């Protein structure tokens, strides 16, 4: 009976630990840095620019005690309504680089193809951003979803808006 209790206790503690690590993996490295215990964090928000659909800022987290700092890109929905104050996501520099590369590939290669079947192209970040396009009813639909678990955070884009956002993302990347 004692062995059964010990085994059960070990299994439950492993499940709790695994769930905790899964929750942490949904955060950017900058967000994890900013929530470390035992730190005194200063947040600076530096405007990069905005379009009709999104606003971009750089958020710089500084631990005032140690002097360490981390910067990331903050993407926020420009559209706010009575039910939502807007959605945002924080991307580390490696994720921002991946998003830029993905949008460039979509712009140059994907949008110039005509698939035979329904097709989806998707980029995902640690912080729950999802961006891409899909082929449906003989046309490409382009989107950025700031929270992949909330369809209301989805922003539909045309090719010109995608190019405008790409330019803002590159500006943000160059300032990080």
Image (cartoon, rainbow, N blue to C red):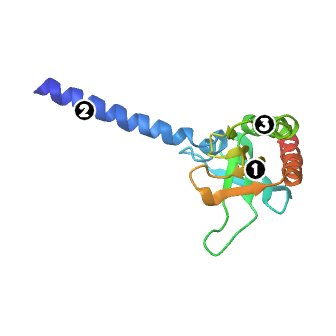
Nearer mark to the viewer, of 1 and 3: 1
Q: Residue at x 85, y 37 (%)?
A: 104
Q: Identify the residue under disc 2.
A: 9
Label annotation for residue 141:
1
Front-most of 119 and 69? 119
Left or right: where 67 falls relative to 161: left
- State the image quarter where residue 20 is shown: top left
Left or right: where 132 falls relative to 175: left
The C terminus, quarter of image: top right
Instruction: Give the vertical position of 125 relative to 4 (above or below).
Output: below
Q: Residue at x 56, y 43 (%)?
A: 36
Q: Identify the residue under disc 3.
A: 102
Q: Position of residue 144 (x, y in %)?
A: 72, 50
Mark 2 vs mark 3: which is more N-terminal?
2
Label annotation for residue 80:
none
> Which element carries disc 3, helix, strand or loop?
helix
Instruction: Give the vertical position of 37 relative to 44 (above or below).
Output: above
- Marks 2,3: beta carbons within 8 A: no
> Badge 2, how many Cα within 10 Å: few under 14, some, many 20+?
few
* Mark count: 3
Instruction: Give the vertical position of 12 relative to 84 (above or below).
Output: above
> Which element carries disc 2, helix, strand or loop?
helix
> Which element carries disc 1, helix, strand or loop?
strand
Q: Residue at x 62, y 50 (%)?
A: 40
């Amino acid at each position: 009976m004692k062995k059964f209790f010990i085994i059960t206790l070990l299994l439950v503690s492993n499940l709790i630990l695994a769930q905790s690590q899964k929750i942490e993996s949904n955060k950017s490295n900058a967000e994890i840095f900013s929530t470390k215990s035992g730190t005194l964090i200063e947040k600076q928000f530096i405007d990069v620019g905005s379009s009709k659909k999104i606003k971009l800022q750089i958020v710089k987290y500084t631990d005032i005690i140690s002097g360490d700092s981390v910067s990331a890109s903050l993407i926020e929905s420009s559209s706010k309504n009575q039910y939502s104050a807007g959605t945002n996501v924080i991307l580390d520099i490696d994720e921002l680089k991946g998003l830029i590369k993905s949008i460039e590939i979509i712009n140059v290669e994907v949008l110039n193809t005509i698939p035979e079947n329904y097709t989806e192209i998707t980029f995902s970040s640690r912080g729950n951003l999802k961006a891409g396009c899909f082929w449906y009813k003989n046309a490409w639909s382009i989107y950025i979803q700031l929270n992949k678990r909330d369809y209301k955070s989805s922003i539909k884009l045309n090719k010109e808006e995608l190019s405008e956002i790409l330019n803002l993302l590159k500006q943000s990347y160059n300032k990080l």
